[in-house]
Image: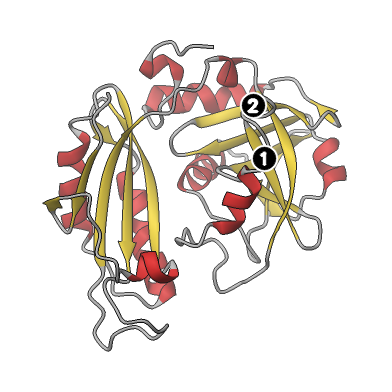
Amino acid sequence: MNRIGYLIDGAASAQLPADDRGLQFGDGLFETVAVVDGYPRLLEAHLQRLTRDAVALGLPEPDPDLIASEAVSLAAWAGDCGVLKILWTGGSGGRGYARPQKPSPRRILSLHPAPAHPRRYWEQGVRATVTTVRLARQPLLAGIKHLNRLEQVLARAQWDGQDAAEGLMRDEAGHVVEGTMSNLFIVREGAVITPDLTGCGIAGVMRRTLMDYLSRQGRPVAEQNVDQAVLGAADEVFVCNSVNGVWPVCEVAGSARWPVGPVTRELQHWIDEQGHACTPALRGAESE
């Protein structure tokens, strides 16, 4: 699928007003949704988070039925696999930080090809680096997928794609919080752990989906601080997001190595069976 399509407030357009508050101040939210067989996956969960985060930021709530209708219509062009991005911005406003008395948010939907990652990322695992860019703690914004992503932009500039597939980010205290585009999980002595996100980080939809699945299997996930010593002592490490599903992490910056373990493989197979993400079995072979 090579087609890229945009809808702005329901109209086919790729032109955004220069006074949009999402552009001016990062005042807004976004969702990144996997499209499989022409349909946006986990859409209800994405729209629930979008609504919850809009409330947290004090923005008017989006109309989930309207966005769902537009998302389904646009996703039909994607073919086997693609990526749908949904933005909910503060709409047009003036020069200053204050929002208009009656904000009129703007919704932007765009359709993109699935990223061309090699199959070995799923099968053999990925190498990750640890970025020097730290995540600032801000409990008011913790967990929210807002448009202010400069920390991730700076972190992603620190490595070449040939050196690593993902970068792990720490907070100011040195706890490993997440990847630049993913959430982190570790398995240690049968227990599944994911970093606590009460101070910073994004509470991903795939993260929540995996936590719910594991809980149904009688293996609740513990949310706790993860330092590099805990990471190094893990039996399995993997990262996840809504587009790629689950990638095993086989190495971090030459300091630790892990095999692809049974919990990681179980989650990969389940995601593949459910069609929740753009996995290799669903989108065909990728080039190395």
Other residues around mark 1 within 10 Å, as few (<14) / some (14–19) / many (≥20): many
Element marked by disc 2: strand
Q: Earlier in the sequence, mark 1 or mark 2?
A: 1
Judge whether 236 appears above or below 32 on screen: above
Foreground mark, 1 or 2, reads 1
Judge whether 188 appears above or below 275 on screen: below
Question: From where the camera sits, is residue 49 visible?
Answer: no
User: Picture quarter containing residue 193?
Assistant: top right
Other residues around mark 2 within 10 Å, as few (<14) / some (14–19) / many (≥20): many
Quickly name the residue at label 1: 167
The amino acid beneath tag 1 is: Gly
Res 248 label: 2
Residue 12, percent across and down? 13, 48
Res 110 label: none
Judge whether 281 appears above or below 107 on screen: above
Query: Relative to residue 194, is residue 37 drawn left or right?
Result: left
Q: How is the image coloured?
A: secondary structure
User: Picture quarter containing residue 77?
Assistant: top left
Instruction: Determine the residue located farthest toward the left in the rendered image.
Output: 11
Query: Relative to residue 6, is residue 252 drawn left or right?
Result: right
The reply to whether the C-beta atoms of the residues labelled 1 and 2 are less than 8 Å apart is: no
Residue 121, percent across and down? 58, 21
Seen at 54% across and 12% down, the residue is 288
Element marked by disc 1: strand
The amino acid beneath tag 2 is: Pro
Seen at 69% across and 22% down, the residue is 261
Seen at 74% across and 33% down, the residue is 190
